[in-house]
Image: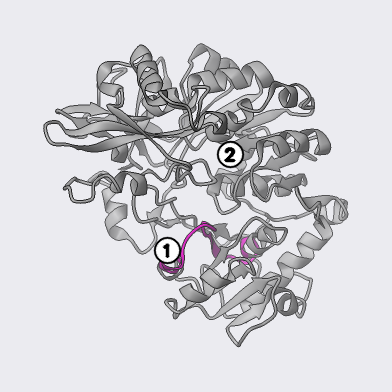
Amino acid sequence: MYAGEHVSNNPERPAIIMASSGEIVSYRVFDEKTNQVAHFLRDSGLQRLDHYAIFMENNSQYLVCCGAGERSGLYFTCINSYLKADELAFILNNSESKVLITSREKLPIVRQALTLCPNIRVCLVIGATSLNAQILSYEQTIDNYPKTPIADEYLGTPMQYSSGTTGQPKGVLRPLEAVLPSQPLALATFLSDIWLYRKDMVYLSPAPLYHSAPQMAVALTIRQGGTCVIMERFDAEQYLALIGEYRVSHTQLVPTMFSRLLKLSDDIKNHADLSSLEVVVHAAAPCPVPTKQAMIDWWGPIIHEYYGATEGLGFATLNSREWLRHKGSVGKVVLGKLHILDANRNTTAAGEAGEIWFETANPFSYFNNPKKTRESQSADGAMSTVGDIGYVKDGYLYLTDRLSFMIISGGVNIYPQETENLLIVHAKVFDAAVFGVPNEELGEEVKAVVQVMPEFADEIGLEAELLAYCHLHLSRQKCPRSIDFTPQLPRLPTGKLYKKTLKDSYWVGHMYSIRQ
């Protein structure tokens, strides 16, 4: 998020546009504000390689607060804005953050968390007045600092935390050299080339800015001198309208967003102006084949997929034309050396699923968590994994599921992602989760929990219809034995399903091994 030469070349060009309010932050203002926040951080005692945190909803100052760290050699942690006070406190303490930046909307949660966080020296609150010596107004405080760069600028970077959907979130720490902020990390340059970023692009960001993928995307857009259109929250109909309104050229989505878009009315879809779109990127979860096929049919062969993790172990990618020849694949590996290993860490046969390991392309560790770092690595430290399952066919990688979500039923290993993907594309299903629940004879059995499209919420016989649908398309062991219905599944705005909490509710009073 370093504005660089674009400040002098095109100072009034919008760096940020907030989608709902229309608020604009120009490159001149963006540069001035990042400098002011950087001065504040130095004044608060933060030196290169220190840590601070950001906890708030998408707003016009979010990227400013990130950009300040990127030009002052700091690690900044953007925290899931939906966390509760104790979860927030865990990350603040674990990350060793000394400063917290938040918003008036999140202040009640923050005040609870701060009672558990003795190392937070000061908390800036956007849109609020100062409350005491620790909790200060962002606007009133920042305005007191110079708009020029600090004397000792260095490149900083995010220290993102894993989503915590399968266990306690972990901070991913990457080594950071003492270089100027004009020199981006090698990974950033690599992704800019892969995603076909260019000068003067317009990027539409529909996702929470606390997540690593959208954060990298907007950071690269600003380094290109482009404009970031930031949605406060994803709404499928508004998203389509924004593409035409701002002549959006680039965007990044997750498969659940594809599903929401496809389930809009034909009238809305047919009237959308998509003529400016050049590159659509998606990742974060396996995409059902019918969903992606429908998106390519609608938007054309401009959809690029990638597979990677916050840890940066390796990277696979493919474009639409490749995917049409290898449907369901997440691409060829272009960064890191891939290994597919069985439970004994032996190489699997060609085409056989196993755990995905990489000879790590980018060194990392889990901050303040040496145990989890060791668990993610091979004995010699040469390879690492995040617990995904997949296989390789014709040189292309296919994902099966997460190891932690595997169901062991009667000794048979079942990966529920395929069943979830099938249910989600059913016309009457809005969302679905599939996991293992207790079975005295088999150990576990397959359970589905479904969120129904509103117009079918009261339909009688829907469970039987969906079970028959599964049996028509899947082998018997992959089919749910029963389906429960819920008004809302716990899916994060990043597209990830918070399955652990849902699954745990079915295991109360039972014993099972939580694989995480």
Residue 87 badge: 1
**Picture quadrant where residue 213 is located:** top right
- Rounded to the nearest angstrom, the CA distance separating label 1 from label 2 is 33 Å
Extreme residue in the bottom direction: 133
Q: What stretch is highlighted in magenta?
A: 69-91
Does residue 219 appear to the left or right of 410 in the view shown? right
What label does residue 190 carry, if any?
2
Tally of marks:
2
Q: Is residue 88 magenta?
A: yes
Quarter of the image for the N terminus: give it: bottom right
Vertical side of 332 occupied by 252: above or below: below
Is residue 197 among what the camera can see?
Answer: no
**Residue 245, visible in the rendered structure:** yes
Q: Which amino acid does label 1 sit on?
A: Glu
Q: Answer few, some or many: residues within 10 Å of disc 1's Cα (few below 14, many 20 plus, some between 14 and 19).
A: some
Is residue 424 shown above or below 508? above
Q: Which of 414 and 175 is in front in this view?
A: 414
Q: Which residue is drawn at 51% across and 56% down?
A: 80
Q: In this view, does 32 lie to the left or right of 415?
A: right
Q: Position of residue 481 (x, y in %)?
A: 27, 26
Q: Where is residue 515 in the image (x, y as percent from the top left)?
A: 25, 44
Please state the horizontal and vertical placement of residue 187, each as a whole percent of the image. 55, 44
Label 1 or label 2, whichever comes before in sequence order: 1
In the rendered view, does 384 fall on the left or right side of 452? left
Q: Which residue lies furthest to the left in this view?
A: 441
Image x and y of residue 247, in percent: 81, 34
* In the foreground, 116 or 77: 116
Disc 1 is placed on an element classified as helix
